[in-house]
Amino acid sequence: MSSLQSNVDSTNSETLQRSNPKKRRKIGHTNSPTLVPWRSDTQQRIYSSKLADALRHVLRRNHPPPPVKSNTGREVRETADRVLAATAKGRTRWSRAILASPLNRWKLRRMHKKVHKAATGLGKRPPETRRRLPVVQKKARLLSRLVPGCRKLSFPNLLEEATDYISALEMQVRAMTALTELLAGGTSQAAA
Amino acid sequence: MLHCLNSNASGNGGADMTLLQRQRAIIKFQQHNNNHHQGYSSSSSSSSSSVSVVQVKSCSPTCLADHDHYSIKPDTCAVPWPKLDNNFLMGFTSSPSGFPPPPPPPPPPPPFDLNSAISRTSSCPLPSLGDGKHTSPLNNKRKTDNPHNTKDVASDNKEKRVKVDAHHHTPTPVKKATQASGDDSNKDNSKTCQKPDYIHVRARRGQATDSHSLAERVRREKISERMKFLQDLVPGCNKITGKAGMLDEIINYVQSLQRQVEFLSMKLAAVNPRLDFNIDDLFAREVFPACAASFPAVGMSPDMANPASYLHFNSPPQIDAGINPQDISLRRSISAPVSMPETFLDSSCFTQSLPSSTWEGDFQNLYSVAFDQARAASFPSQLFTGLLEPNNLKMEMEM
């Protein structure tokens, strides 16, 4: 974990240093075309190179490893997300959120959710009628939960973050698919 | 002369009584009175002079206005119609064309007043300019009082300015010069400066001018704009209209993308351990000090890269004993060049575009032999067609 952490920490420190002055600036979001162009090939190349390298670390660490633990998949996923956020150069909220909370954020969040649900289940329900949120707001909440770091965001900003996040995810899927195909093709070639 | 006046008055064709028409009506009345009341010698002389003036300048209605004004002045004392005249004169003389305001009835004019009137005709300012100037003080007034009297302005016309609007059609400079370049529409968020800038909004014709509804309209338009972006991004959203349906689609899409990423990561984790990583560790130990020595900064020239890569290229054969040559070639192709980028990445992560391109070019040259085998592996491009160029990625991996 040390080598990966050092790698990630360096990226973390840099992104945080860069993102702090950006956070102080008022959130006058630049329009989506001026954000990272996730569709371009250069971006994909950059991402793939970083991803390959980061994966090296992870898999090297995990290789002599306990095959009992099936953490590798999750770690790979987290690495991939972090590399994606690093490629985003910290301009977007979700990327900063991913980089800022590295340690098993999904797992912790799930644990927190379970605890929270148990607690509320035990508590008595208020007798008043449940306030029915408008449908759109419910969905907006769902979306905000999906996009990392966008919980308490206004609706238009949430939409903008979602736009960027979707294109980033698309690029991530593309890159990882190509990577798996390469590696799968490579290993099959080697085995043959 | 009365007829010509009538024709002039009707010739304007305006439904409203323009100032000219009113003044001509006054003249008519005055002349009528003067014709009747011949007892006033001065007035009669002035009336005759005024009539003559009218006759002379009947062709140019604009100058007629001035003459009317001048000719009216001597008559105001005589004609029992002072109130109207004063009102007209007040209204007309607010324009800074040099007409003195006549609240008290002026003394009867000497004959040389006519000369002055005639002399002014040569350089008579057009009433259009007068109108422009007439409105500009009001505009200035609007601008100065704008923060205070937004409601008054709204009552005047259908346009309302929440704050000072830069799109006002006057040559006078906008006072609040912090208007950013939101030229497409006033409703853009123009927050280029660090302090929050105001949103300059203008209500469209036929729309409510309440500040609340304006703000809400701005908000709605922001949201719809972003929804349009998302519609382009998410596949299959063209048919769906309405925020709820769109949001459903977006949520589904994001969830599917995240699931895909997870699936691919599992796949990667499964695929990778096949490669032998012992050699990678050895590489790491050997390569890192060498790399650290030879690569001090990010902007490495490709020349420096070459000897180091040769180093890596030479080292593997010494280490691997009893391992498949194919494995070696692959591992070399994958691991060795990647260890070099590691140092780059550690130092800085954000200036990769340039070096990556140079790496690819060089490494392609270097590892062409080993790569023939890798390239021969067919690329099943089932999932993504046309979205990526397999060659680039191949080079990427072979780096």
Image (cartoon, coloured by chain):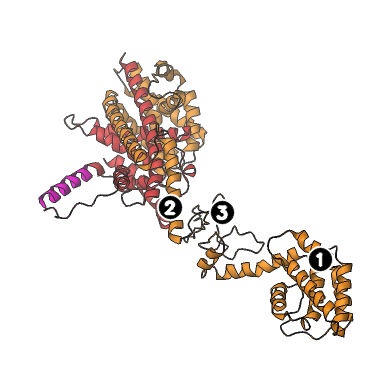
Chain colours: A red, B orange
Around disc 1, counting alpha carbons within 10 Å, would you say few (fewer than 14), some (14 to 19), or many (20 or more)? some
Look at the image and tell me in which quarter the C terminus of chain B lies.
top left
Along the polypeptide, which appears first: circle 1 or circle 3? 1
Q: Chain of mark 1?
A: B
Are labels 3 and 2 on one chain?
Answer: yes
Q: Chain of mark 2?
A: B
Location of residue B57 with respect to B312 vertically, above or below: below
Spatial CA span between label 2 and label 1: 57 Å
Where's residue A135, x and y in %? 30, 45
Q: Secondary structure at mark 1?
A: helix
Tag of residue B181:
3
Image quadrant where residue B266 sits: top left
For the magenta stretch, what is the residue range? A107-131
Left or right: A124 with respect to B44? left
Q: Chain of mark 3?
A: B
Left or right: B338 with respect to A112? right
Residue at x 75% of width, y 67% of height = B20
Along the polypeptide, which appears first: circle 3 or circle 2? 3
Tag of residue B219:
2
Where's residue B84, x and y in %? 70, 76
Residue at x 74% of width, y 63% of height = B128
Quick check: can you spot residue B294? Answer: yes
Tag of residue B5:
1
Image quadrant where residue B295 sits: top left
